[in-house]
Image: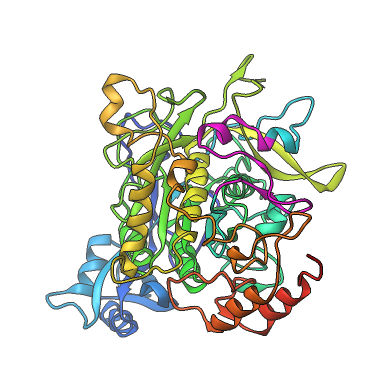
Amino acid sequence: MRHRLDTCLLTTAVALCAAATVCAEIPEGTIDIGTLLIRGTAGAADDAVVRLAAAGYEASVDERLEAIGLSRLCVAPAPGSGIDVPSAKDILAAIAGITPPAGFEEAGFNYEYGIGGGQTGSLWVTRAVPHQNLDFRNQYATQEIGIVAGDSYPGGPPGNRLPASGRGVIVAVLDTGVVPVGDLARVALPYSFDAVSGELPSTGAPTLDPGGDGIDSDNDGAIDECVGHGSFVGSLIALVAPEARQLHIRCIESDGRTSTLLIARGVNAAIDAGAHVVNISAVVPNEPNLLGSVVDAARDKGIAIVASAGNSPVNQSTYPASYPSAGSVSVSGPNFGFSAAFATFNREVDFCAPGESRYIGPATAPVPVDGEVVIGIIGRMPLDPTQPLYSTASGSSFSSAFASGLAALVRGAQPEWPSTAVPLASIGASVVSHIAMTTHGMEVPREQQPFVGSGVIDCAAATLFVSTDTVPTLPFDINPAGGTASDGSPRIDGADLAALLSAWGPVLPGRISYADLDHNRVVNGADLAALLSRWTTTP
């Protein structure tokens, strides 16, 4: 029996057939008729329960995702109703009828699918001599997307030496959770949400990647191939935007299975946490009911949604990337070439980013080619758990991660948004379009040229508009015009204190405050204490 991600009163699933051209990397999905999702008011969901009861079903509202206006209902035939196998058409007809309930907008079933963002079989390719931190920081992607890894100041966190660092931005990573080691220990927020288990937001620690469950949930012959996926994605985001904090929301299980409901829970949690960017490294070839509305809800809250286009070399729309509310990212390889051998392409792709690793040797034992691989953190070193374990992989999941990092740089440099010129619901589109307009050229086969977006993301070009004395790039430095101390560390002084006090209070929806040092959406005594603890006492 296939492992269930979520169960209601009824566990009947109806398989959906995918197009014959779709490769295994974009797997088929299933509909769980027992889990009904209703968008609209809470009253509309309650009315739906009454109508379902009149039609011979047992139903209950088991969950309400208030930020996106979505209710989860569990539905099953009532005893003695004579209904053996419920019909999706009949269930939806029972709710809407001739006149839908007041406050009702749309309804659909929970659609379950695989993320399509990793490799089948062995997701992570290692080598005899493990990759080191220097390999990670100098991988080919850093040169091709216009960042230069280094230390932002002596003893400080790694910086990208750009005029923006993602300061003040929260990036929600909807993935498998995280192993907080290396850069991830620095950027992972100490609160989180586990959409798979349904645990409420927690404090004190990020959502941990729980490791494998020992079950081949997606029936691809590989077990737990997505363990570490969220860490890999998060480490690439941190490489580009070293000061953006990451909210890791677990909504993908160890084999890469997720669903409309899990993504909806993740987006709802991201909105509640005040996220500015959401990375979704998940792909489905069919357009699931309600998923578009979930993405739209995030856009309306001022969030830039960045999603992977997929790992199947066909011209096919994939979701959620192909929704107009999302930025769709396909894959480039070394030397600014489109990864035609495996990358999905379509007219909805906005741009590309590095995501291809090259190997030599047999497929059963590939060897990474130094200088031509994407490197990320997948966990801890077995013999020294304080050190990150790096490995290589290919996939649009990782292209999306690089682009999300750039989205954090662009968004963090414009804290005045929303504004009259850029209202809340236009922020996400403004970030994506700016990235698309500043890309680097890319070599693309003629037949695919109209379907791969504007080129390879370019962090240096995308941040040219940033004035170096307006956006802080050093930790705890709220007023960037204050300069640095003699040792190169940020000068924390009266100018920073004045800036913090002027920002005192809640951070308005969609806004960025450089004074919100702990990223809890309010500038208060905790931020003041953090600032004073770093006060510069010498010139």
> What count of labels does the image hold?
0
Q: Nearer the viewer, residue 121 or 80?
A: 121
The picture quadrant where one finds residue 358 is: top right
Would you say 424 lies left or right of 55 here? Answer: right
Where is residue 195 drawn, in percent x and y? 54, 64
Magenta residues (range): 136-162
Question: Is residue 141 rendered magenta in the image?
Answer: yes
Where is residue 114 drawn, in percent x and y? 47, 45
The vertical placement of 327 against 491, above or below, is above
The picture quadrant where one finds residue 505 is: bottom right
- Which residue lies at the image location 31% right of the left edge and 65% below the top edge? 422
- Which residue lies at the image location 52% right of the left edge and 37% below the top edge? 146
- Quarter of the picture containing the C terminus is bottom right
Q: Nearer the viewer, residue 124 or 498?
A: 498
Where is residue 19 drawn, in percent x and y? 30, 35
The vertical placement of 526 against 310, above or below, is below
Q: Is residue 109 visible?
A: no
Most extreme residue toward the front is 539
Q: Nearer the viewer, residue 356 or 221?
A: 356
The vertical placement of 421 against 356, above or below, is below
The vertical placement of 193 against 337, above or below, is below
Would you say 455 lies left or right of 360 here? Answer: left
Question: Is residue 161 rendered magenta in the image?
Answer: yes
Most extreme residue toward the right is 383
Q: Is residue 342 visible?
A: yes
The picture quadrant where one finds residue 411 is: bottom left
- Which residue lies at the image location 31% right of the left edge and 69% below the top edge? 423
Most extreme residue toward the top is 361
Would you say 249 lies left or right of 37 here? Answer: right
Q: How is the image coloured?
A: rainbow
